[in-house]
Image (cartoon, rainbow, N blue to C red):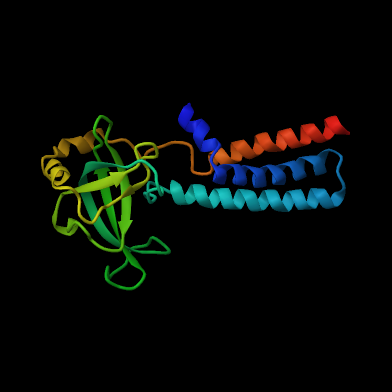
Amino acid sequence: MMRAARRLLAPDTLLGAAAVGLAFGALAEGVIDGPTWLLVVGLTATAATFLCLGAVAERGQSAGIAAGLRSGGPRAYAPALVHTVRAVHRDTGQLALDPQAAGSLFAFDLTVVPEGGRPFRVEVRHPLDVQDLLHRGHAVVEYDPRQPWRVVLPDRPPAEWAARARRLDPEAAHTTEGPPAGLPPGAHLLVAGAVVAAGLVGALHLAG
């Protein structure tokens, strides 16, 4: 509860919520009894808001593809099983013939086995095969315990975790869950913006 409160009161969240709230408020006021220009502005701003929030959510939780770690966010190591390694085009995600070609990435299909949690499967993309996973069946990942769809492959994982990865039981993959779920990135801005919009519209009508 305290974490959620701190997140909502962060300066970037407050600024984003104010922008979303103004867009929603302009739309609501334009629909209720505002001038036509306010309705047009509200529609345009709301459409732009949904496009931006949708892009953020898609980038964070798209089809099991891992997002990067948040700056300053919590991090933990975990061993992982490697299912496949393939090369894909950076922009389209389609298979690439040459993993060394410009615009190509390695796509690592992994089952992450977090300490104290159920294993989950995720795809991590990286421009380099930093842990030589083309020739190994295990890896070490760094992930966000609060938003476990955020997973990266560290260049030099700690030796302790590398040893844990080597000891992983392949049967762990049989208890795997789908890609980690949770509120999409940007959802808190949508909720906070709706609250701001309700407050603005309510205040205007009480004052009028």
Q: Residue 63, image x and y in percent?
A: 41, 47
Q: Answer above or below: position of 20 versus 146.
A: below
Viewer-closest of 74 and 154: 74
**In the image, is 8 to the left or to the right of 175?**
right
The count of marks equals 0
Q: Residue 202, image x and y in percent?
A: 78, 32
Viewer-closest of 87 and 208: 208
Q: Answer above or below: position of 179 versus 87.
A: above
**In the image, is 195 to the left or to the right of 93?**
right
Viewer-closest of 166 and 9: 9
Q: Residue 10, image x and y in percent?
A: 53, 40
Q: Residue 97, image x and y in percent?
A: 28, 69
Residue at 89% of width from left, 34% of height from top? 208
Residue at 15% of width from left, 43% of height from top? 165
Q: In which quarter of the image is residue 78?
A: top left
Residue at 22% of width from left, 44% of height from top? 80
Looking at this view, name the residue that lies furthest to the bottom. Answer: 102
Viewer-closest of 20 and 168: 20
**In the image, is 88 to the left or to the right of 190?**
left
